[in-house]
Amino acid sequence: MTTTAAPTTPARVPMDSLRKTALAVGVLFLITYVTSIAAKFGFYPPLFEDAEYVDGAGSDTRVLWGAFAEMILIIANIGTAVFLYPILKRQHHGLALGFVTARVMESVFIAVGVLSVLTIVTMRQDFAGVADADSAGLATVGHALVALQEWTFLLGPGFVVGVGNGLILGYLMYRSGLVPRRMAVLGLVGGSLIVLSGTAVMLGVIDAGSALHTLAVVPEFFWELSFGIYLIVKGFKPSPVTAGMVEAR
């Protein structure tokens, strides 16, 4: 009498450490993508659309959620730098350090913007509607803090990102071949346009949020989105840069 052996379940192939890093970086990039858009265009509009926000009824909960989203953005920014640095330094140590520095500086600008937003909310809660409050002075300070928040966005996500995520990361990805080179070229183009447009805004050549300024952001927008999705779906391409780094865990 013969017996039939029970079918065996195929052994699960463990995910190697490099694939885990790619997955983590991809997820963090998408988090930065979502939180930055949510804060700027979803939660913060009351600050920019209502000229008398600080002295009026306000939408504190909505604005505070925007500040919280940007705090998550800061954590995700630093996370991308931490996870990518051990890989990027194998291609070029100096530029890898430059990428980390750019990510930190971007986060500093964002943090200053968050502080300005929280200060506006605190002022509105403490002084709005108070009979003896100096409404004109309150409004002036409120406008100044809103302007500060707008400048932190222009100097951080609107300038430093072009240097770090665009030029430095795009170049390192192009040279290493860790992602398709056409995708990396998009980063180089996007970074250059971000830097140029950000400089033009600072010098008063174009207006922030103008059609030309918005158009210049598009390549960087798609570079970061495609980079995050690619790493999540496929991970890093085989490259001499990562030779010896693969370890199953």
Image (cartoon, rainbow, N blue to C red):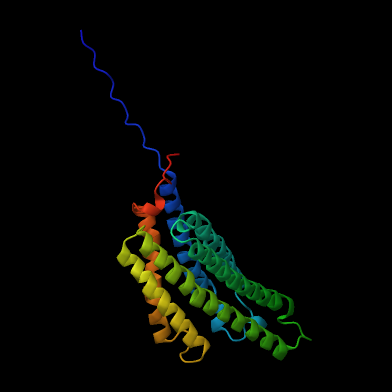
Residue visible at 66% across and 83% down in the picture = 142
Q: Is residue 232 above or below residue 171?
A: above
Residue visible at 57% across and 77% down in the picture = 152
Residue 187 location, quadrant: bottom left
Question: Taking 139 as reference, is 50 left or right?
Answer: left
Asked whether the viewer can see residue 198, the reply is: yes
Residue visible at 65% across and 81% down in the picture = 54
Q: Position of residue 98 (x, y in %)?
A: 52, 67
The C terminus appears in which quarter of the rendering? top left
Instruction: Please identify the residue farthest to the right as the structure is shown.
Output: 132
Foreground of the two, 122 or 17: 17
Q: Is residue 37 above or below residue 228?
A: below
Question: Taking 76 as reference, is 192 left or right?
Answer: left
Q: Position of residue 176 (x, y in %)?
A: 37, 59
Residue 90 location, quadrant: bottom left
Q: Position of residue 155 (x, y in %)?
A: 54, 78
Foreground of the two, 210 or 43: 210
Residue 27 location, quadrant: bottom left
Foreground of the two, 189 or 10: 189
Q: Is residue 158 above or below residue 15?
A: below
Residue visible at 35% across and 32% down in the picture = 11
